[in-house]
Image (cartoon, rainbow, N blue to C red):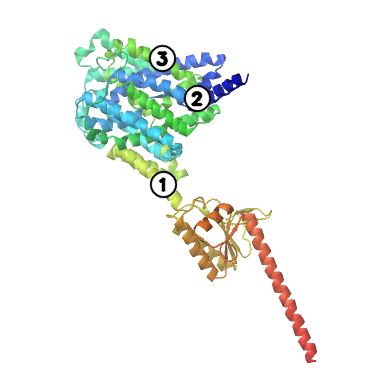
Amino acid sequence: MITTYFIIIEVVVLLSRLYGFMPGLETFSRYERSWLKDDVRAGLSVAAVALPVAIAYAQLTGVNAAVGLYSCVLPMLIYALFGTSRQLIVGPDAATCAVIAAVVTPLAAGDSLKHWQLVMTMTVMTGFWCLIASRFKLGVLADFLSKPILMGLLNGVAITIIVGQFSKIFGFTFDEKYLLERLGGAPSYLSQTHIPTLLMAILTVVVYFVMKRLKPTWPASMFAIAVGGALVWAFHLTDYDVAVIGSVAGGLPSFQAPVFNIGIARELVMPALNLAMVSFVSMMLTARSFAAKNGYDIDADKEFKALGLANIASALSQGFAVSGADSRTAVNDANGGKTQLVSVIAAVLIAVVAVFLTAPLEFIPSAALGVVLVIASVHLIDLKAIWGLRVRDRQAFYLALTTFLAVLFIGVIPGITLAVLLGLFQFLRTVMRPTDQVLGLDAKGIIRSLDSSDKASSVPGVFIYRFNSPLTYFNATYFKRRLLERFARQNQLETVECVIIDAVPCFTHLDLSVMAMLTDIDVLLRKRGVSLVLAGRKRQLISWFEQTDMVSGEEGITIRSDLYLALKMQQSHVAACEAQQLDDSHSDDSTETVLTHSQI
C-alpha cells in the first residue's frame, strides 16, 4: 500500500513538472468534447489562410515555396505544447521575413544554396537567443520595445514590403536596394511594366475582394492564388512570360548541415538578436491581446522559450524564422478556436500539402503572391494611430515617427537597431530622470502628493519626499539635486526641521554611490539643523548601513518602518521638545519669582 502511494506521488510530481515544462499538455489533459467542433473549424480556417501566406513569405525571404510550408508545421506543433496562449498561431511573419531577407541577401551574393543555409542559421541563432532570454527570465523584454516604437517599426516594414512587391506585380526588376532610390526611379520602372503580369495581378485583386464581399469567412487569399494558378495551367501563360514560382521540392524535409565561412555566420549574430527581440515583442502584443479577450494569463518567460524552440524546430525542418501571426490568430479566434489543438490540426493539414500536394503549387503566379503580400502588409499600416499619438503623448509620437522614418530611409536592419536603442534610451531616461513628489496629509490624515488640487497640505516643520525610481549610481546625483531643490523651496515658506524620504520605491538594492550620496545629504542637512529620516525597508537599510559603516539613529540617519510611523515619531519628538521648552520656561519664571521675592 505504501509503495502504491509513493508511485502515485511520483506520477503526480512528474506530471506537474511536465505541465510546467509543456503548458499545452495541461490543456489537452482536461480537454472537453464540446470544444472539438470549434477547434476543427478554426484549424481548417487557419490552414486555409496560412497556406498562401506561407508560400508568399517564402518568396519574400528568397527560398523555395516548400520552405514556407515547412516553417508552419513543426513550429505550430512545438508551440502547441510549449506555449501558454490558447489562441496564438505561430508561423511566417511579414516583419521577420523582411528582416531575414535584408540580412541574408547581400551575404549570399546570389548563391541560392548559401542563401538557404544562412536563412536556416539565422533562424537557429534567433531560437537560441530566445532560449537564453527565457533561461535568464527576460520575459520583461516584452515591455522593452514600447508599443509606439513597434508601431513605427511595423509601419515602416509594411511600406518597405509593399514597394518591394511592386516589381512582381508590374513585372520588372529593381536595381536599387533601398526604398528611396526605388521610389526615385519609379517613372523608369513603370515604363518597363509587363502587361500580362500586371493583368494577372489585377485579376488576383478582383478575385480577392469579390470573395471577401460574397463569402467574408472564406480564405480569399487562397482562392485568389488558386484562380491565378489555374489560369496559368489552363492557358499556358508562362509562354507569355508570366512569372511563376516554379518547381516546388515537396516531400519530407531532410536536414542538411550548412557549409559556409564562419566569418559570414558571425555577421548574423546581432541581426538574430534584433530579430528575436522584435519577434518576441510582436508575438507578446498579439498573445496578450487575445488572452485578455478570452480571460486567461500569459507567461512571458515560457513564451520566450516556446518561441525559441519553435524557431529551432523550423530550422531543423528547413524552415525560416517564425513569430506570432496576428492575422491567423485573429482567424482562429473569429472561428471560435478554444485550445492549442487548432495549431495541431492546421499543422497536419499543411504537412499533407507540403508532402503530397506540392505539384500544383508550381503554377502559382509570382504576381498573385505579390498581391497577397501587399494585402497582408496593408493590414500592418496604421499611420493614423501614429498621428494620434501626437495629441495623446508627444514623446511617444516622436519615438514612433523616428523609428518609422529610420526603417524607410536607412533600411530595415538599421531601423530595428535604432528601435532597440530607442527602447533602451527611453528606459534609461525613465530611470535616470523619474518623476518625484513632495508629500503631505489630507483632511483624513492620509499621506498623499501635494499638487494643485489642494487636497493635501504640508506637515508643519516636515518635508516628505518620494523618488519614483530605484536609486543607483547614475541617478544618485539627480536625486540629491531634486531633493535639495524641493527642500529649499518648502523651507522658504516655512521652517523645516525634518526631512523624511520614502525609501520603498527608491532604495531597492545596495549601491555604494547611493550610500555615499546619502551621507552627503545628511551632512548638509545637519549643518542647517535638520534631521534626516528614511521611512520603509528598515531591516534592509540597517543591514546596508552596517555593511558600509554608516551611522544610524540619533547620531546619524534615523530609520523608521514606514512613512506614518516616521511622521508620528517626528511629531512626538516635536511635542516632547515643546513640552521640555515649556517646562524650562516655567522653571525660569519660578526662579525669577524667587529671586524677586528674595530681593524684596
Dot in front, 1 or 3: 3
**Secondary-structure class at tag 1:** helix
Q: How many marks?
A: 3
**Secondary-structure class at tag 3:** helix
- Quick check: 106 left or right of 130? left
**Secondary-structure class at tag 2:** helix
Residue 538 in sight here: yes
> Three-letter amino acid code at disc 2?
Leu
Q: Residues within 10 Å of mark 3 (few under 14, many from 20)?
A: some
Q: Earlier in the sequence, mark 3 or mark 2?
A: 2
Which quarter of the rendered picture does the N terminus lie within? Answer: top right
Q: Position of residue 213 (x, y in %)?
A: 42, 18
User: Which residue is depicted at the point 43% across and 40% down?
Assistant: 146
* Circle on res. 426: 1
Quarter assignment of residue 161: top left
* Circle on res. 118: none
Which quarter of the rendered picture does the C terminus lie within? Answer: bottom right
Q: CA distance from mark 3 to mark 2?
A: 24 Å
Q: CA distance from mark 1 to mark 3?
A: 43 Å
User: Which residue is depicted at the point 46% across and 34% down?
Assistant: 301
Which residue does the numbered mark 3 point to in the structure image?
A: 348
Dot in front, 2 or 1: 2
**Residue 128 or residue 182, whichever sits in front:** 128
User: Which residue is depicted at the point 62% across and 21% down?
Assistant: 2
Q: CA distance from mark 2 to mark 1?
A: 39 Å
Contact between labelled residues 2 and 3, with CB atoms less than 8 Å apart: no
**Residue 350 or residue 374, whichever sits in front:** 350
Q: Position of residue 466 (x, y in %)?
A: 54, 55
Which residue does the numbered mark 2 point to in the structure image?
A: 18
Q: Position of residue 4 (x, y in %)?
A: 60, 19
From this view, report whether residue 565 is shown above or below residue 121.
below
